[in-house]
Amino acid sequence: MISANNVTLRLGKKALFEDVNIKFTEGNCYGLIGANGAGKSTFLKILSGQLEPTSGDVVITPGQRLSFLQQDHFKYDEFSVLDTVIMGNKRLYDIMKEKDAIYAKEDFTDEDGIRASELEAEFAEMDGWNAESDAAMLLNGLGIPTEEHYAIMKDLPSPLKVKVLLAQALFGNPDILLLDEPTNHLDLDAIAWLEEFLINFENTVIVVSHDRYFLNKVCTNTADIDYGKIQLYAGNYDFWYESSQLLVKQMKEANKKKEEKIKELQEFISRFSANASKSKQATSRKRALEKIQLDEIKPSSRKYPYIDFRPSREIGNEVLTVEGLSKTIDGVKILDNISFILGHDDKVAFVGSNELAKTTLFKILAGEMEPDEGTFKWGVTTSQSYFPKDNTEIFDTDLVITDWLTQFSEIKDATYVRGFLGRMLFAGEDGMKKMRVLSGGEKVRVLLSRMMIMATNVLILDEPTDHLDMESITALNNGLIKFPGVVLFASRDHQITQTTANRIIEFMPNGTMIDKITTYDEYLESDEMARKRQVYAMSEDDANDN
């Protein structure tokens, strides 16, 4: 068990948390939710001991081991992948290294033998002989091939580093597991594996995530941060949402009845306070009036943008024809003879672990990259807007948001443009912020504003939920569901993929593709996915053999 007792954290004069008291018990998975800036990651740092609170303390049951997801992707650059994972249990890793050092001595003494014997006993008690195979199973489950297990961390691409650090946090069955955005940069297969791991995990988990489907799948409880307090709810994210909305509704209804009673008492007092025969009753009602207190209903600190993609032109029957597209980058074939045709009702989710293939295709279709072979043709009635995965160049400008967005609007009126920004939570002078100083979430909202103001009938989105808070993701999800045009998108958000897509195209590691008219959940149960799960099971068997 881990608990926070009267925890307060002040940043200057502002209290981010004040007198927080909460217990997280064994056998439960807690989803820690709240608006951007509410302090979710900060609270995890307090629980993990990385950050000291201004007052109060954190108590962990004696003897229990806490593990958390490291955010520094360069911390282990000089270590092998397997060693990095095993470091998740520091004591076990230290024993391994001390044993190796003793056995490597040329002048092995009796004292060394005694020490080695002690270490071997502790090593066996900690199931150390299975450490490498356990680490390999975690790595394989997250989609890291066996040939990478002995690689040096600095040689891995960033997406694989993220998976290694996640495997490190999961390693060795920790008693308390803290995960801050564990699904970031994971492909959908790895997310599905992590869901099953956490569902079967028997100890305490506290997780921060913007993935609603993930929270619904793994969480038994929800801890909601709002106005510096943390309110605990039994149930997953959807249950919290329904419960919190119901609570506010009940408080409003109770206040309405109290207001009616107050009005009734005030009218009686006003009419009869000067009447001698009614004066006692009037005095009694004054006392009753003084006892009535309205419930304080604070509006949530959450803010929902309004995302509404409205095409200026209806799309025709001919949308997109792709024939034999191939692309090689740095000697690696990313796309291999890709062909498909889109209809006017298609909303296509591009899935699979081959993220570069998805990004490359989107860049080609958006006119930002040329294919090596093959052709593509957009229908004459189509117009496209593109949300790129890497937006660095877009924001490398001294323009303010309003001036930048005006470039993409047919109507050059500043009030009209500011209206789109207002929907995306850029109120008043926020529209005069310079593009280059925006946060990650603000950049995403600006790019979505551009897509709305362009009023195209085809949307191409490459991981649009990165850096968005839960409220913005929900608004985007609703906007994509309502959009009457064609959508091509890649997203790690399961709920967006399931509720938006009516067609799934999966890129395989070799650059080929699988194309099915189906929902995402149905696709996960298809023969192709069963085959892939079998491959994963075989890789776990290989890890055990090693």
Image (cartoon, rainbow, N blue to C red):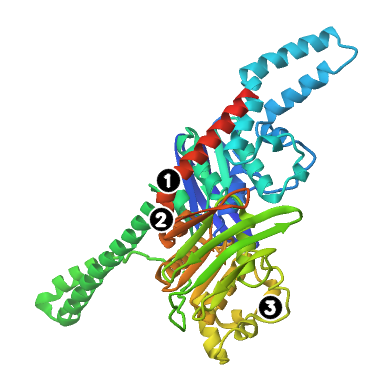
Whether label 1 touches label 3, CB < 8 Å: no
Residue 222 appears at what percent x and percent y? 43, 49
Residue 455 appears at what percent x and percent y? 50, 81
Q: Is residue 25 visible?
A: yes
**Quarter of image, res 256:** bottom left
Secondary-structure class at tag 2: loop
The residue that label 2 is drawn on is 518
Residue located at (44% from left, 52% from top): 213
Which of the marked residues, 1 or 2, is nearer the chain's N terminus? Answer: 2
In depth, the one of 55 and 206 nearer the eye is 206
Residue 85 appears at what percent x and percent y? 67, 35
Residue furthest to the top: 110
Residue located at (56% from left, 31% from top): 538
The mark found on residue 434 in the picture is 3
Secondary-structure class at tag 1: loop
Amino acid type for the residue under numbered disc 1: Ser
Left or right, residue 373 beside residue 342 = right
Secondary-structure class at tag 3: loop
Question: Eyeballing the image, is 308 above or below 119?
Answer: below
**Quarter of image, res 105:** top right
The residue that label 1 is drawn on is 526
The C terminus sits in image quarter:
top right
